[in-house]
Amino acid sequence: MRLIRERILYSMCYDMLQQEHFAYKTDSGFAIHCRETPLWIMPSRGRESSEARLFFEDFLRRNNQPIIGIISEKEIALACAEAYKKDYFSSELVAYYLAPEVPLKFASYELRLASVAEMPLVLEWINNFYTETLDTAFPNEKKGSSEDKPSFFSQLYVLWDSRPVAMGMLSGAGETCRLNLIYVPPPLRGNGYGKAVVSALSEKVRENGQVPMLYTACENVAANKLYTSLGFREAGRLTEVRF
């Protein structure tokens, strides 16, 4: 199987494009903007930071929504951040994928779709995930109605070991499917639940004929150790800028 590096590296970008978020395209590349997430900029040619900056400045003239951040290759992300003329901080993301030939090890836990009854606990875990990993609050508009399970959670799973012990979400269409919101509550960590939920989610992705992939911050040592121990390979790195 031939894996396309850019399809893995920019998986989130492709997914946002399919969700019909605002897209700006030229021969130099395309930018995908959703107000809840940083702006994704994917270059299609050139890749010089000066060319990317011109592309970004033209995008700004056509888009009147505030930008909370930028994700792209390092030089491009930083050049565009300088053009935006606001204070920012940056961090590096690793894109991992699990090749089809890598075997998975499973523990005897049950993985099930999150139910409406589990939503209060799931929302608590998601808030904790956002606080711990993103240093921000979970967007209220994604929570939806308390009477129904919001569509945002349609592919959110809970791992059970006589009780809920971990969660994770799947998102994406096409060649890849992204694992996201991988979370184990602090009192339950160290019991193998992280590996178990990642393995079980990856198997579901493979059953659909897709390649499991995910993003994680370089400085998240525990997460990087977990994914590499399961056989995930690095596809490349991106820089995230936050204003």
Image (cartoon, rainbow, N blue to C red):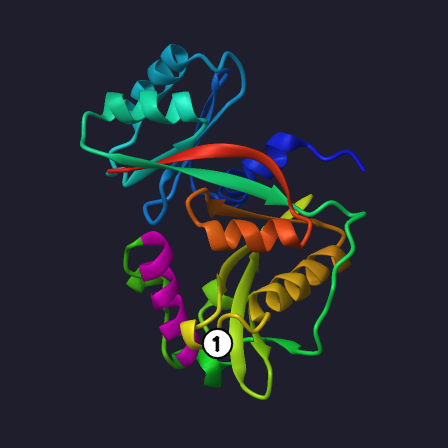
Closest to the observer, 186 or 216 = 186
- Front residue of 14 and 167: 167
Q: If the image is split into quadrants, where does the C terminus sit?
A: top left
The verdict on residue 206 being magenta is no
If the image is split into quadrants, where does the N terminus sit? top right
Residue at left 65%, top 47%?
Answer: 232
Query: Number of labelled discs?
Result: 1
Please indicate whether residue 200 sits to the left or right of residue 145 in the image: right
Residue displayed at 41% across by 79% down: 121
Give percent across and percent down for residue 75: 40, 21
Taking 37 as reference, is 209 left or right?
right
10 Å crowding of disc 1: few (<14), some (14-19), many (20+): few
Specify start and end residues of the magenta stretch as a single range.
121-134
Residue at label 1?
188
| Magenta span: chief secondary structure | helix
Quadrant hosting residue 193: bottom right
Decide which of 165, 154 is in the foreground and name it: 165
Q: Secondary structure at mark 1?
A: helix
Residue at left 75%, top 59%?
104
